[in-house]
Image: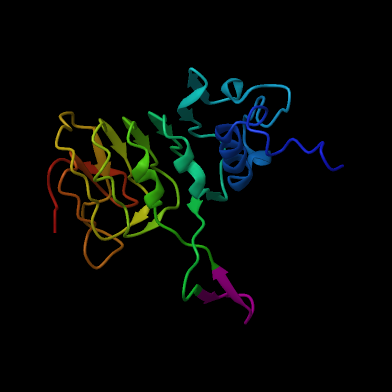
Amino acid sequence: MQGFDQTNDLSLCPIKRNALKEFYDSAKGGEWTLSTNWTDPHIGHCYWYGVKCRDGSTIKLELPNNGLSGTLTLNIKILRALEVFDLNNNNIKVRRILEQPLIIYSFNSNRPLILLQGSIPSEIGVLSNLTRIHLSYNEFTGNETNFAELRKLKHIHLHDNRLSGTIHSSNGAFDKESSFISDCGNPSDFRKSLRCENCTMCCEYNLNTCKLDTYYL
């Protein structure tokens, strides 16, 4: 009814809550292992499972090993106060419009299958308060990963995805063995290994083997 739609009333539905709701829908929240209070209209987003706030702003989004799938909404960039972003050990991809979608053919039929691919979105690069990013054991692909502007980062875990190219990071403060981990070792599924000049540990893709400060090819 006109005049009674409160969806866009920011006093009742803060933009941060709406961004989290979009994240939930995009990552197939109805299939998560735990989703306590998520999207409940009577419960504030700061009380949703895996969400921690400070002064009403989301500072932590921690949902490791929780059955997330689907894609990662690009509106994650709205959570500008976010300090910890942990989606480790799920099945997240990125929604991305491809000029030429990857098409393969099923072994059981001649019908083409269009696959959704995507890199870790550049939108994460505006979350300047991030200190920890754990995105390992997901389905991220591509070569557009860039954390060059995230100067507060202390931990980045990206291993066991299918990233390629170069990971850019201007932060040279990774002083612990497990601070910055990615799949930059050999053997690799790629003609050339992922290049990661700041990585403190390189993993051999799909072999569960990590080696320190080596294999920058």
Q: Residue furthest right?
A: 1
Please count the marks in the image: 0
The correct choice, above or below, for 187 with respect to 25 in the image is below
Residue reaching furthest to the bottom = 110
| Residue 92 visible to the viewer | no
User: What colouring does the structure picture have?
Assistant: rainbow
Q: Which residues are magenta?
A: 103-114
Query: Residue 3, how many percent across, how many down?
Result: 81, 38
- The image quarter containing residue 77 is top left
Residue at far front of view = 3
On screen, residue 2 versus residue 17, left or right, reads right
**Residue 146 place in picture, x, y as percent:** 29, 50
**Where is residue 129 shown, x and y percent of the image?**
34, 31
In the rendered image, residue 154, in percent from the top left (x then y), is placed at: 25, 30
The residue lying at 61 percent from left, 40 percent from top is 24
Query: Is 86 on the left-hand or right-hand side of 168?
Result: right
Determine the image quadrant of residue 9.
top right
Taking the magenta stretch, the answer to whether it contains residue 113 is: yes
The C terminus lies in which quarter of the figure? bottom left
- Residue 117: say if magenta: no
Task: Locate the N terminus by quadrant.
Answer: top right
Q: Residue at x 58, y 45 (%)?
A: 27
Relative vertical location of residue 61 with respect to residue 52 in this rendering, above or below: below
Q: Residue sitting at 34 percent across and 32 percent down?
A: 130
117 to the left or right of 1: left
- Please say if 194 is above or below 49: below
**Observer-nearest of 86 and 216:** 86
